[in-house]
Image (cartoon, rainbow, N blue to C red):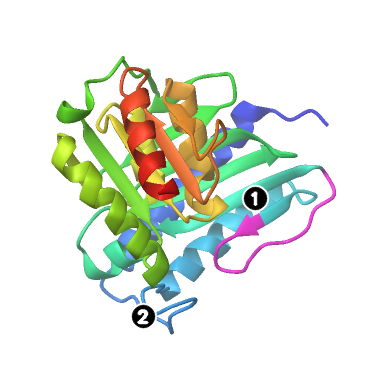
Amino acid sequence: MNRDLAAARDLAATVAVQAGRLQLERHDTLRVGAPKAHANDVVSDVDIASERLIVDAITAAWPDDAVQAEEGHGRPGTSGWMWVVDPLDGTRNYISRTGPWSVCVALYEGDQPRVAVVHEPVADETFSAVDGGGAFLNGVSLQVTGGPSLDKALVGISFQPNPATKDRAGKVIRDLLPVSGDIRRLPAALNLAYQAAGRLDGGLCLDTNLWDIAAGALIAREAGVILGGHGDDFTPELTIGAAVDLWPELSALVRAVLVS
């Protein structure tokens, strides 16, 4: 089934910006619900309203597509295409006003990511990509350079805040921080998008979900970031990204810590 990928990207960008505006408008009146998987896995009524806005728009445009969405508004489909939606990646940052968050929308054809949008509402920045068509920030092309050595590199780290993953992340940070330029903890989608923009030289995401990394990974890849995991393919369990010159050092260190 043919699909106008530019039109899909434009719709994804439009609804992501609309959801971002809703999040800014409702920041002072949000209500936090009960934790989900664990005490640090929080959700607000704004997450749910944002997801409903995005899924309703997608369903109206492509009613036969499947949707996989974090807050439960997913649906099966018959077209072979699937939208992957994280309406608010970085909910705890959003609730506590302690850092950035983003709206993430990706489109898959089978198991192949074809379209991606990550929108950061506060900065009004929209990262986007089409498979084979490059990555962009507010319409300006992104292309990473070779990158620095690890001792000068700024590295992003993202992880699910459950006890087991925090323990694994702590081991990586223990070995990475002394030998890197510095590290930053970020939500997974912005970790990957910032690598695409050259703001981070590399990064890793531990024990995420597909909706956390689907959009950011395509944007990073299209900008020239090398991606991998325990092997050549990245997974939600482990996604490592880096500029080409940094990749050997960073990937070797991360893999050594997590395998040991």
Tally of numbered tags: 2
Q: Which residues are magenta?
A: 68-79
**Callout 2 secondary element:** loop
Relative depth, front residue between 197 and 140: 197
Location of mark 2 (residue): 31
Q: Position of residue 34 (x, y in %)?
A: 43, 84
Q: Categorize mark 1 by other alpha carbons within 10 Å: few (<14), some (14-19), many (20+).
A: many
Give the farthest residue toward the bottom.
Answer: 34
Front residue (pair 172, 26): 172
Examine the rendered structure and indicate whether residue 13 appears above or below residue 86.
above
Report, in whole angstroms, how far the alpha carbon at label 1 lies from the one at label 2: 26 Å
Q: Secondary structure at mark 1?
A: helix
- Which quadrant holds the N terminus? top right
Position of residue 254 in the picture relative to residue 28 (left or right): right
Quarter occupied by residue 131: top right
Which residue is at a point 40% across and 33% down the rendered structure image? 241
- Residue at 14% in and 34% down: 181
Which residue is labeled 1 in the image?
A: 58
